[in-house]
Amino acid sequence: MVIKNADELRQLTYEILHVAGANKNHAEIVSEHLVLANLRGVDSHGVWHVPGYVEAIQNGSIILDKEPEIAKETEVSALINGGWNFGHVVAEFAIQTAIDKANNREVSVVSVVQTHHIGRLGHYAEIAAREGMISMVWAGGQGAEEPAAVPFGGRKPLFHTNPIAMGIPLGTEEPIIIDFATSATAGVKIVNAFNRKEKLPPQCIVDKDGNPTTDPNDFFNGGAHLPFGGHKGYALMLATEFLGRTFSGSDNGANLNYSNPLFRRHGVTLIVFRADLFQSFSEYAKRADEMSQRTQAIPPAPGFEEVLLPGMPEAKAQNIRQEDGIPIADDIWQSIAETASALGIKT
Protein backbone atom coordinates (compact mmCIF):
# COMPACT_ATOMS: atom_id res chain seq x y z
CA MET A 1 0.00 0.00 0.00
CA VAL A 2 1.28 3.46 -0.97
CA ILE A 3 0.25 6.56 0.99
CA LYS A 4 0.07 9.91 -0.79
CA ASN A 5 -1.15 13.24 0.50
CA ALA A 6 -3.90 14.91 -1.46
CA ASP A 7 -1.82 17.83 -2.73
CA GLU A 8 0.97 15.71 -4.23
CA LEU A 9 -1.53 13.27 -5.73
CA ARG A 10 -3.52 16.13 -7.23
CA GLN A 11 -0.36 17.65 -8.70
CA LEU A 12 0.77 14.34 -10.18
CA THR A 13 -2.64 13.69 -11.69
CA TYR A 14 -2.72 17.19 -13.15
CA GLU A 15 0.76 16.78 -14.67
CA ILE A 16 -0.10 13.43 -16.24
CA LEU A 17 -3.31 14.72 -17.82
CA HIS A 18 -1.73 17.99 -18.95
CA VAL A 19 1.30 16.31 -20.52
CA ALA A 20 -1.06 13.82 -22.17
CA GLY A 21 -2.70 16.77 -23.92
CA ALA A 22 -5.42 18.22 -21.69
CA ASN A 23 -5.43 21.99 -21.32
CA LYS A 24 -4.66 23.43 -17.88
CA ASN A 25 -8.27 24.15 -16.94
CA HIS A 26 -9.53 20.69 -17.88
CA ALA A 27 -6.58 18.96 -16.21
CA GLU A 28 -7.30 20.90 -13.01
CA ILE A 29 -11.01 20.02 -13.04
CA VAL A 30 -10.39 16.31 -13.59
CA SER A 31 -7.52 16.01 -11.11
CA GLU A 32 -9.56 17.78 -8.44
CA HIS A 33 -12.51 15.49 -9.08
CA LEU A 34 -10.46 12.27 -8.98
CA VAL A 35 -8.50 13.12 -5.85
CA LEU A 36 -11.62 14.30 -4.04
CA ALA A 37 -13.18 10.91 -4.79
CA ASN A 38 -10.19 9.25 -3.13
CA LEU A 39 -10.33 11.64 -0.21
CA ARG A 40 -13.97 10.77 0.35
CA GLY A 41 -13.21 7.06 0.31
CA VAL A 42 -14.73 6.37 -3.11
CA ASP A 43 -11.55 4.85 -4.54
CA SER A 44 -13.42 3.21 -7.43
CA HIS A 45 -13.89 6.69 -8.92
CA GLY A 46 -10.51 8.17 -8.00
CA VAL A 47 -7.02 8.10 -9.51
CA TRP A 48 -7.56 4.45 -10.49
CA HIS A 49 -8.92 5.98 -13.72
CA VAL A 50 -5.83 8.00 -14.65
CA PRO A 51 -4.17 5.37 -16.89
CA GLY A 52 -7.48 4.69 -18.61
CA TYR A 53 -8.09 8.38 -19.26
CA VAL A 54 -4.63 8.77 -20.77
CA GLU A 55 -5.29 5.79 -23.01
CA ALA A 56 -8.64 7.33 -23.97
CA ILE A 57 -6.89 10.59 -24.91
CA GLN A 58 -4.39 8.70 -27.02
CA ASN A 59 -6.98 6.63 -28.88
CA GLY A 60 -9.35 9.55 -29.41
CA SER A 61 -12.08 8.41 -27.04
CA ILE A 62 -11.63 11.63 -25.07
CA ILE A 63 -11.69 14.52 -27.55
CA LEU A 64 -9.66 17.32 -26.04
CA ASP A 65 -10.43 20.17 -28.43
CA LYS A 66 -14.16 20.10 -27.73
CA GLU A 67 -15.87 22.32 -25.17
CA PRO A 68 -19.35 21.56 -23.82
CA GLU A 69 -22.00 23.69 -25.49
CA ILE A 70 -25.71 24.27 -25.09
CA ALA A 71 -27.52 22.76 -28.05
CA LYS A 72 -31.04 23.68 -26.97
CA GLU A 73 -32.44 25.60 -24.02
CA THR A 74 -35.36 27.36 -22.37
CA GLU A 75 -35.45 29.40 -19.18
CA VAL A 76 -35.76 26.18 -17.14
CA SER A 77 -33.99 23.58 -19.27
CA ALA A 78 -30.94 22.89 -21.38
CA LEU A 79 -29.55 20.14 -23.57
CA ILE A 80 -25.76 20.11 -23.48
CA ASN A 81 -23.52 18.51 -26.07
CA GLY A 82 -20.26 17.52 -24.44
CA GLY A 83 -18.38 16.58 -27.60
CA TRP A 84 -16.97 13.57 -25.72
CA ASN A 85 -14.54 15.69 -23.77
CA PHE A 86 -13.72 14.66 -20.19
CA GLY A 87 -17.06 13.85 -18.60
CA HIS A 88 -16.08 15.75 -15.46
CA VAL A 89 -15.63 18.95 -17.47
CA VAL A 90 -18.96 18.45 -19.23
CA ALA A 91 -20.89 17.52 -16.07
CA GLU A 92 -19.51 20.47 -14.09
CA PHE A 93 -20.66 22.77 -16.90
CA ALA A 94 -24.04 21.05 -16.78
CA ILE A 95 -24.56 21.31 -13.02
CA GLN A 96 -23.55 24.97 -13.04
CA THR A 97 -25.97 25.60 -15.90
CA ALA A 98 -28.70 23.85 -13.90
CA ILE A 99 -27.90 25.86 -10.76
CA ASP A 100 -27.95 29.16 -12.66
CA LYS A 101 -31.32 28.37 -14.20
CA ALA A 102 -32.77 27.21 -10.87
CA ASN A 103 -31.57 30.42 -9.25
CA ASN A 104 -33.46 32.38 -11.88
CA ARG A 105 -36.54 30.19 -12.26
CA GLU A 106 -36.53 28.04 -9.09
CA VAL A 107 -36.29 24.69 -10.90
CA SER A 108 -34.33 23.34 -13.85
CA VAL A 109 -33.75 20.20 -15.88
CA VAL A 110 -30.51 19.78 -17.81
CA SER A 111 -29.49 16.80 -19.91
CA VAL A 112 -26.09 15.90 -21.30
CA VAL A 113 -25.25 13.86 -24.39
CA GLN A 114 -21.96 12.98 -26.07
CA THR A 115 -19.99 12.73 -22.85
CA HIS A 116 -17.21 10.49 -21.64
CA HIS A 117 -17.17 9.06 -18.09
CA ILE A 118 -18.38 11.73 -15.62
CA GLY A 119 -16.90 10.11 -12.50
CA ARG A 120 -18.47 10.24 -9.04
CA LEU A 121 -22.01 11.55 -9.40
CA GLY A 122 -22.11 12.69 -5.77
CA HIS A 123 -19.58 15.37 -6.69
CA TYR A 124 -22.21 17.25 -8.68
CA ALA A 125 -24.85 16.82 -5.98
CA GLU A 126 -22.36 18.35 -3.53
CA ILE A 127 -21.83 21.36 -5.80
CA ALA A 128 -25.59 21.96 -5.96
CA ALA A 129 -26.07 21.47 -2.21
CA ARG A 130 -23.47 24.16 -1.48
CA GLU A 131 -25.69 26.55 -3.45
CA GLY A 132 -28.79 25.64 -1.42
CA MET A 133 -30.14 23.38 -4.14
CA ILE A 134 -31.70 19.93 -3.98
CA SER A 135 -30.53 17.83 -6.92
CA MET A 136 -30.84 14.50 -8.67
CA VAL A 137 -28.40 13.06 -11.20
CA TRP A 138 -29.30 10.11 -13.44
CA ALA A 139 -26.68 8.51 -15.74
CA GLY A 140 -27.74 5.86 -18.24
CA GLY A 141 -27.16 4.59 -21.74
CA GLN A 142 -23.75 2.97 -21.33
CA GLY A 143 -25.33 -0.44 -21.77
CA ALA A 144 -26.90 0.45 -25.11
CA GLU A 145 -23.98 -1.01 -27.04
CA GLU A 146 -22.03 -2.74 -24.25
CA PRO A 147 -24.69 -4.16 -21.89
CA ALA A 148 -23.30 -5.34 -18.58
CA ALA A 149 -26.25 -5.71 -16.16
CA VAL A 150 -29.20 -8.06 -16.29
CA PRO A 151 -32.74 -6.89 -15.52
CA PHE A 152 -34.35 -8.56 -12.50
CA GLY A 153 -35.32 -12.08 -13.51
CA GLY A 154 -33.33 -11.88 -16.76
CA ARG A 155 -30.51 -14.06 -18.00
CA LYS A 156 -28.84 -11.71 -20.50
CA PRO A 157 -27.50 -8.19 -19.87
CA LEU A 158 -29.37 -5.13 -21.10
CA PHE A 159 -28.27 -2.19 -18.92
CA HIS A 160 -25.05 -0.98 -17.31
CA THR A 161 -24.30 0.08 -13.71
CA ASN A 162 -26.66 3.09 -14.18
CA PRO A 163 -25.65 5.24 -11.19
CA ILE A 164 -27.81 7.86 -9.51
CA ALA A 165 -27.10 10.61 -7.00
CA MET A 166 -29.18 12.99 -4.92
CA GLY A 167 -28.09 15.93 -2.82
CA ILE A 168 -30.09 17.52 0.00
CA PRO A 169 -28.64 20.58 1.76
CA LEU A 170 -29.04 20.90 5.51
CA GLY A 171 -28.60 23.95 7.71
CA THR A 172 -25.57 23.73 9.98
CA GLU A 173 -24.56 20.21 8.98
CA GLU A 174 -22.98 18.64 5.92
CA PRO A 175 -25.52 17.88 3.16
CA ILE A 176 -27.08 14.49 2.66
CA ILE A 177 -25.44 12.95 -0.42
CA ILE A 178 -26.96 9.78 -1.84
CA ASP A 179 -24.73 8.26 -4.52
CA PHE A 180 -24.71 4.67 -5.74
CA ALA A 181 -24.73 2.42 -8.75
CA THR A 182 -27.98 0.58 -9.28
CA SER A 183 -25.91 -2.54 -9.87
CA ALA A 184 -24.91 -4.49 -6.78
CA THR A 185 -21.29 -3.42 -7.15
CA ALA A 186 -19.19 -1.01 -9.21
CA GLY A 187 -17.42 -2.28 -12.30
CA VAL A 188 -14.05 -1.16 -10.95
CA LYS A 189 -14.45 -3.51 -7.99
CA ILE A 190 -14.96 -6.44 -10.36
CA VAL A 191 -11.84 -5.48 -12.32
CA ASN A 192 -9.81 -5.22 -9.10
CA ALA A 193 -11.08 -8.59 -7.86
CA PHE A 194 -10.18 -10.16 -11.20
CA ASN A 195 -6.67 -8.65 -11.20
CA ARG A 196 -6.07 -9.66 -7.58
CA LYS A 197 -7.59 -13.15 -7.99
CA GLU A 198 -10.17 -12.43 -5.29
CA LYS A 199 -13.78 -13.53 -4.92
CA LEU A 200 -16.69 -11.10 -5.06
CA PRO A 201 -19.44 -10.92 -2.43
CA PRO A 202 -22.54 -13.03 -3.17
CA GLN A 203 -25.39 -11.58 -5.25
CA CYS A 204 -23.19 -9.18 -7.22
CA ILE A 205 -22.84 -10.91 -10.59
CA VAL A 206 -24.14 -13.80 -12.67
CA ASP A 207 -22.36 -16.04 -15.17
CA LYS A 208 -23.21 -16.29 -18.87
CA ASP A 209 -26.16 -18.57 -18.09
CA GLY A 210 -27.64 -16.24 -15.46
CA ASN A 211 -26.45 -18.24 -12.46
CA PRO A 212 -25.22 -16.29 -9.41
CA THR A 213 -21.45 -16.51 -8.95
CA THR A 214 -18.66 -14.92 -6.91
CA ASP A 215 -15.90 -15.59 -9.47
CA PRO A 216 -14.97 -12.40 -11.37
CA ASN A 217 -13.73 -14.58 -14.25
CA ASP A 218 -17.36 -15.47 -14.91
CA PHE A 219 -18.18 -11.80 -15.42
CA PHE A 220 -15.57 -11.44 -18.15
CA ASN A 221 -16.69 -14.68 -19.79
CA GLY A 222 -20.14 -13.42 -20.72
CA GLY A 223 -21.52 -12.72 -17.24
CA ALA A 224 -23.17 -9.56 -15.96
CA HIS A 225 -23.96 -7.33 -13.00
CA LEU A 226 -27.02 -7.97 -10.87
CA PRO A 227 -29.21 -5.04 -9.78
CA PHE A 228 -28.84 -4.30 -6.07
CA GLY A 229 -31.83 -5.21 -3.91
CA GLY A 230 -33.53 -7.44 -6.47
CA HIS A 231 -36.62 -5.93 -8.11
CA LYS A 232 -36.26 -2.62 -6.23
CA GLY A 233 -32.78 -1.91 -7.54
CA TYR A 234 -33.88 -3.05 -10.98
CA ALA A 235 -36.71 -0.49 -10.92
CA LEU A 236 -34.22 2.29 -10.19
CA MET A 237 -31.88 0.91 -12.86
CA LEU A 238 -34.70 1.09 -15.38
CA ALA A 239 -35.71 4.60 -14.28
CA THR A 240 -32.10 5.71 -14.70
CA GLU A 241 -32.01 4.32 -18.23
CA PHE A 242 -35.16 6.22 -19.14
CA LEU A 243 -34.08 9.51 -17.55
CA GLY A 244 -30.41 9.33 -18.51
CA ARG A 245 -30.77 7.94 -22.03
CA THR A 246 -34.32 8.03 -23.37
CA PHE A 247 -35.35 11.41 -21.96
CA SER A 248 -32.08 13.12 -22.90
CA GLY A 249 -32.25 11.84 -26.47
CA SER A 250 -28.71 10.52 -26.30
CA ASP A 251 -29.47 8.07 -29.10
CA ASN A 252 -30.09 11.06 -31.38
CA GLY A 253 -26.57 12.32 -30.74
CA ALA A 254 -24.89 8.96 -31.17
CA ASN A 255 -22.03 9.03 -33.66
CA LEU A 256 -21.18 5.55 -34.90
CA ASN A 257 -17.72 6.81 -35.89
CA TYR A 258 -16.96 7.66 -32.27
CA SER A 259 -14.38 5.15 -31.03
CA ASN A 260 -15.82 4.11 -27.65
CA PRO A 261 -19.15 2.25 -27.88
CA LEU A 262 -19.58 2.44 -24.09
CA PHE A 263 -20.21 6.19 -24.30
CA ARG A 264 -21.81 6.55 -27.74
CA ARG A 265 -25.32 6.64 -26.28
CA HIS A 266 -24.42 7.71 -22.76
CA GLY A 267 -26.79 10.34 -21.40
CA VAL A 268 -27.11 12.18 -18.09
CA THR A 269 -30.05 14.14 -16.71
CA LEU A 270 -29.75 16.58 -13.81
CA ILE A 271 -32.80 17.89 -11.98
CA VAL A 272 -32.15 20.84 -9.68
CA PHE A 273 -34.51 22.95 -7.56
CA ARG A 274 -34.20 25.47 -4.78
CA ALA A 275 -34.52 24.12 -1.25
CA ASP A 276 -36.37 27.31 -0.31
CA LEU A 277 -39.01 26.87 -3.00
CA PHE A 278 -41.95 26.74 -0.55
CA GLN A 279 -40.53 28.43 2.55
CA SER A 280 -37.60 30.61 3.55
CA PHE A 281 -34.26 28.86 3.58
CA SER A 282 -33.91 29.49 7.31
CA GLU A 283 -37.20 27.67 7.93
CA TYR A 284 -36.20 24.86 5.61
CA ALA A 285 -32.75 24.56 7.23
CA LYS A 286 -34.25 24.44 10.72
CA ARG A 287 -36.57 21.57 9.78
CA ALA A 288 -33.86 19.78 7.79
CA ASP A 289 -31.43 19.91 10.72
CA GLU A 290 -34.15 18.73 13.07
CA MET A 291 -34.83 15.70 10.88
CA SER A 292 -31.12 15.01 10.60
CA GLN A 293 -30.64 15.18 14.37
CA ARG A 294 -33.69 13.01 15.08
CA THR A 295 -32.35 10.38 12.69
CA GLN A 296 -28.90 10.34 14.22
CA ALA A 297 -30.38 10.19 17.74
CA ILE A 298 -31.88 6.75 17.10
CA PRO A 299 -30.05 4.18 19.27
CA PRO A 300 -27.72 2.04 17.13
CA ALA A 301 -28.56 -1.61 16.55
CA PRO A 302 -26.20 -4.36 17.73
CA GLY A 303 -23.01 -4.24 15.69
CA PHE A 304 -23.33 -0.53 14.91
CA GLU A 305 -21.73 2.39 16.70
CA GLU A 306 -24.10 5.08 15.45
CA VAL A 307 -26.79 5.92 12.93
CA LEU A 308 -25.32 7.82 10.00
CA LEU A 309 -26.86 9.85 7.21
CA PRO A 310 -25.88 9.26 3.57
CA GLY A 311 -22.73 11.24 2.89
CA MET A 312 -21.46 11.08 6.47
CA PRO A 313 -19.10 8.11 5.88
CA GLU A 314 -17.53 10.01 2.98
CA ALA A 315 -17.15 13.15 5.10
CA LYS A 316 -15.50 11.13 7.87
CA ALA A 317 -13.17 9.49 5.35
CA GLN A 318 -12.16 12.88 3.98
CA ASN A 319 -11.26 14.17 7.44
CA ILE A 320 -9.07 11.15 8.06
CA ARG A 321 -7.42 11.00 4.66
CA GLN A 322 -6.78 14.73 4.56
CA GLU A 323 -4.74 14.26 7.73
CA ASP A 324 -3.23 10.78 7.27
CA GLY A 325 -2.93 10.59 3.49
CA ILE A 326 -4.69 8.62 0.78
CA PRO A 327 -3.97 4.87 0.66
CA ILE A 328 -3.46 3.50 -2.85
CA ALA A 329 -3.18 -0.22 -3.55
CA ASP A 330 0.22 -1.27 -4.89
CA ASP A 331 -1.09 -2.52 -8.23
CA ILE A 332 -3.00 0.70 -8.85
CA TRP A 333 -0.02 2.86 -7.95
CA GLN A 334 2.21 0.80 -10.23
CA SER A 335 -0.17 1.41 -13.11
CA ILE A 336 -0.21 5.16 -12.42
CA ALA A 337 3.57 5.28 -12.10
CA GLU A 338 4.02 3.43 -15.39
CA THR A 339 1.67 5.86 -17.12
CA ALA A 340 3.59 8.81 -15.69
CA SER A 341 6.94 7.32 -16.69
CA ALA A 342 5.76 6.79 -20.26
CA LEU A 343 5.00 10.53 -20.38
CA GLY A 344 8.39 11.45 -18.92
CA ILE A 345 7.03 12.32 -15.48
CA LYS A 346 8.79 11.21 -12.31
CA THR A 347 6.74 9.79 -9.40
Image: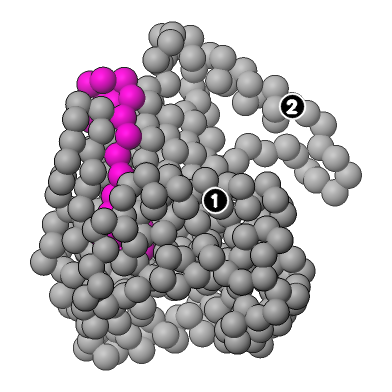
Left or right relative to 29: residue 5: right
- Label 1: few (<14), some or many (≥20) within 10 Å? some
Instruction: Give above or below for 295 relative to 33.
Output: above
Tell me if I can see residue 19 in this picture: yes
Alpha-carbon span between mark 1 and mark 2: 35 Å
Q: Earlier in the sequence, mark 1 or mark 2?
A: 1
Left or right relative to 58: residue 119: right
Report the amino acid beneath label 2.
Answer: Ala
Looking at the rendered structure, the secondary structure element under dot 1 is helix
The residue lying at 41 percent from left, 71 percent from top is: 145
Q: Quadrant of residue 340?
A: bottom left
Image coordinates for residue 277, horizontal then vertical, percent? 39, 15
- Between label 1 and label 2, give the one nearer the viewer: 1
Circle 2 residue:
297
Magenta residue span: 99-118
Residue 238's mark? Answer: 1
Image coordinates for residue 342, horizontal then vertical, percent? 27, 91
Whether 334 is among the magenta residues is no
Is 152 or 203 nearer to us in this picture? 152
Report the amino acid beneath label 1.
Answer: Leu
